[in-house]
Image (spheres, rainbow, N blue to C red):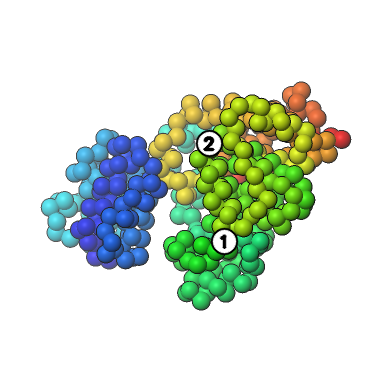
Amino acid sequence: MRLHRNLCFAVIDGLTLIFNEGKYADKVIQQLLKRDKRWGSRDRGFVAETIYDIVRWKRLYAEIAEVKAPYDRENLWRIFAVWATLRGIKLPDWKYFEATPSRKIKGRFDELSKTRKYKESIPDWMDELGVNELGESVWSKEISALNVQADVILRVNTLNTTKEKLQSELFDLELDTEFIKDHPNALRLKERANVFQTEAFKNGHFEVQDASSQLVAEFLDVKPGMRVVDACAGAGGKALHLAALMENKGQVIALDIYGNKLNELKRRAKRNKAFNIETRAIESTKVVKKLYDKADRVLIDAPCSGLGVLRRNPDAKWKLQPEFIENIKKTQQEIIQQYSRIVKAGGKLVYATCSVLPSENRKQVDTFLTSDQGKEFTFIKENNVFAHKSGFDGFYMALLEKKK
C-alpha cells in the first residue's frame, strides 16, 4: 500500500479533533469524507478505517510511540507511524517519519501484548470492571471480540420486500450478501460498502442494524393488532422492526425524551412505509402516565454503558467514565420501575441493553422483581448475547410477564 499525503493529513486532522477536543469519531469522519470531491470509495475507506483503527488501539499505539495526551501533531504522526509499521506499510521519506524505529516498534508491540489492558487497548478501570463482573476468562475473550471491526448487517424490511428479493437486488449492484443462521431477517455484507446510496435503501427495503440488535424486537413476541410501546425509542431502529413484525397492523407508540431523535424516526418510518408508528416526546410525566395499564407489550431498550457495542463505537472506550456507569444504573432502575406500569395485566415487557455487564442486566431485573412494582411480574426468559460467542454486538434482553 502506498500512502498519499492528503489522505494521511485528513487522518491526522481527524485524530486531533477526536483525541484532543473530545469530538465523536463517527461525526468527525462524516465531515472529513466531504473534504475532497475527488476521493474515490477506496480513499474514503482508507480515511475512515485508519481513523477508527487508531482510535480503537489508541492506548497501545501511544504506549509504543511513547507519547502522552494531549497529543500535538508531531505525536499523532508518531502514533500513525506505529499503525503503519505494525501493518507492514512502507513509510515514505516524509519529514514526519524520519527516524521511525521500526524494529523497536515491533519489539515494544510484542512486549506490551503480554498485558491485557495494553493488548486490548483499554483504560485500567474498564479492565478491572470487566474482570470483577465477568471473571478473567470471559472478560479476556469478550474484550478481544469487542475489538474486532463490526460487519455491516442489514435488516430486511419485510413490509416492502423479502430477504431473497433484497439479496438478489443487491447482487445486481455487485453487493454480495449472505444469510445469518437464527436471524430470520438479517443479511451480512461480504465486503464493506456504502449501502445508503442504493435505491434499495432509498425505497425502504432495509435498515442497517446489527444482528444482535435484531433479536430484541423478536424477543418481545408481538402480534399484528397489538398496542406496543417502545419506551426509549431513540431514532427508532427497533420500533421500525416492531412495525414490520406486526405487519403494519395495530399501534407502535414510540416514546423518547429527545424530540430530535423522534423526528429522525418519523423520516425513517416514512421511507420504510411503516404507518402504524406514532411518536410521542416525553415532555412531562403525563405522557407516560396516560399509558399506564394500556399496552400489550412494552420494550425498554434502556440507556447503558454501551460496552457491548465497542466494535462500532471504539471511541467510547476513552469517553466512558466509571461514574457514568454508576449513574446510568440508577437511571435504568428508575426507567424499569416507571415504564413497567404501562404494561396491562397479561401483557409482556422486555428489558434490554447493549451492555455485557451483569450489574446493568440481570441484576437490574432481579432488583426490579423484588420491588413492590416488580412483584406484579413473572420472569419468563433472558438472552445474554456475548460478542465472543455470537460474532456480533454484546446485548442483553429479559422477557417478563405481568400477572393477570
* In-front residue for pair 229/95: 229
Residue projecting furthest to the right: 404
In the rendered image, the vertical position of residue 111 relative to residue 271, given as above or below: above
* In-front residue for pair 130/384: 384
In the rendered image, the vertical position of residue 191 relative to residue 335, given as above or below: below
In which quadrant is the C terminus drawn?
Answer: top right
Look at the numbered disc 1 and give the secondary structure of its residue.
loop
* In-front residue for pair 112/94: 94
Query: x%, y% of residue 192?
Result: 45, 63
- Quarter holding residue 328: top right
Residue flagged by tag 1: what amino acid is it? Gly
Residue flagged by tag 2: what amino acid is it? Tyr
Which of the two labelled residues, at mark 2 and mark 1, occupies the earlier sequence position? 1
Q: At x 51% / y 62%, what residue is drawn?
A: 202
Q: Is residue 128 left or right of residue 26?
A: right
Q: Is residue 90 left or right of residue 239?
A: left
Residue 9 visible in the picture: yes
Q: Which mark is residue 258?
A: 2
Q: At x 61% / y 27%, what residue is drawn?
A: 284
Q: Are marks 2 and 1 in contact (CB under 8 Å)?
A: no
- Quarter holding residue 137: top right
Query: x%, y% of residue 91?
Result: 21, 59
Query: How far apart are labels 2 and 1 at the CA level?
Result: 24 Å
Residue projecting furthest to the top: 372
Look at the numbered disc 2 and give the secondary structure of its residue.
loop
- Quarter holding residue 197: bottom left
Q: Is residue 27 left or right of residue 355?
A: left
Q: Which mark is residue 204?
A: 1
